[in-house]
Image: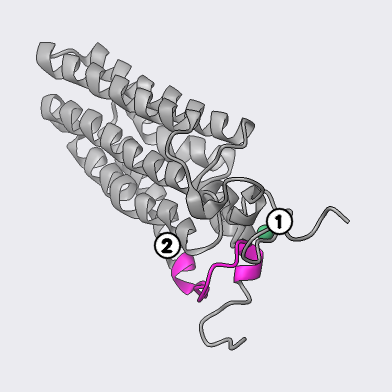
Amino acid sequence: MSVSAAGSSGALCCGHRGCTAAVSSSASASAEQWGTWPNVVTAIRTIATMVAWAVAVTIGSDVWLLAALLCYWVGDIADGLLARVTHRETRTGAVLDVLADRLSVCLVVVSYVSTHPSAALPAAVFLGQFVVLDAYLTLAFIRWSLLSPNYFGLVDATVYRLNWSPPAKATNTGAVVLLWLVTGSTLAATLLATVVLGVKSYSALRIARLPIPQALSGCAVLDATNLAGAST
Ligand SMILES: [Zn+2]
């Protein structure tokens, strides 16, 4: 025996890493905890970013603004890695991570543009992409029984590859900022930001065409059978 149902209300263990059913055993997905170590790291990296940003705007320092950006980047990699390695991924944590990212990036980019107006155009395209489109895409996982967008491949492999595979993450979040810092070219940064915006727009259209599950089964793959109109 052993395998099969894990206790209460029809809980299943589907075996897919990233499905909410996969974390069943003790504290199930229906009773998520806020106080996980990855969430603590998210809180610390966000506070560190805000402190560095506050110093930057107080003394007018680009170096501190860069420090704020690094706190966000390094911390964002660290909290996600910790969650995956320790198997403490939660949907709450994934949502908090998305919100903390937008706060951090907005503070840094808006402050930077206020003293470097030539960055306004690429910054506007980048912020529109990151704060609106990318936030929408990153939160879309909530409609399926997924722990985070890192497992969106169970729902749509193309959208996953374009947005949350390791190379996509690296280029989507950092490429425009890095290109700007290295070249200082408004044109180059704006063009790259527009390309990323195009990838996000295509992804949003793809997601909009996906059938939405009527009920969450605990398994993102099974969710596909609980579609609107499909009677059970
Ligand atoms: Zn599953």
Dot 2 lies on which element? helix
Q: Could you tell me which residue is drawn at 12 percent across and 11 percent down?
A: 59
> The disc labelled 2 sits on which kind of residue?
Ala
x and y, in percent, of residue 169 in the image:
50, 39
Residue farthest along the front direction in this orientation: 8
Where ligand 1 lies, by quadrant? bottom right
Q: Residue at x 48, y 37 (%)?
A: 171
1 vs 2, front mark: 1
**Ligand 1 lies under 8 Å from the Cβ of mark 1:** no
Residue 200 image offset from top left, x and y in percent: 41, 54
- Which residues are drawn in magenta? 206-223
Residue at figure coordinates x 54%, y 41% from the top left: 89
Q: Is residue 126 a member of the stretch shown in magenta?
A: no
Q: Residues within 10 Å of mark 2 (few under 14, many from 20)?
A: some
For label 1, the crowd category at 10 Å Cα-Cα, with few meaning under 14, some 14 to 19 and many 20 or more, is some
Numbered-mark total: 2
Q: Quadrant of the C terminus?
A: bottom right
Query: What's under tag 1, amino acid-wise?
Result: Ala
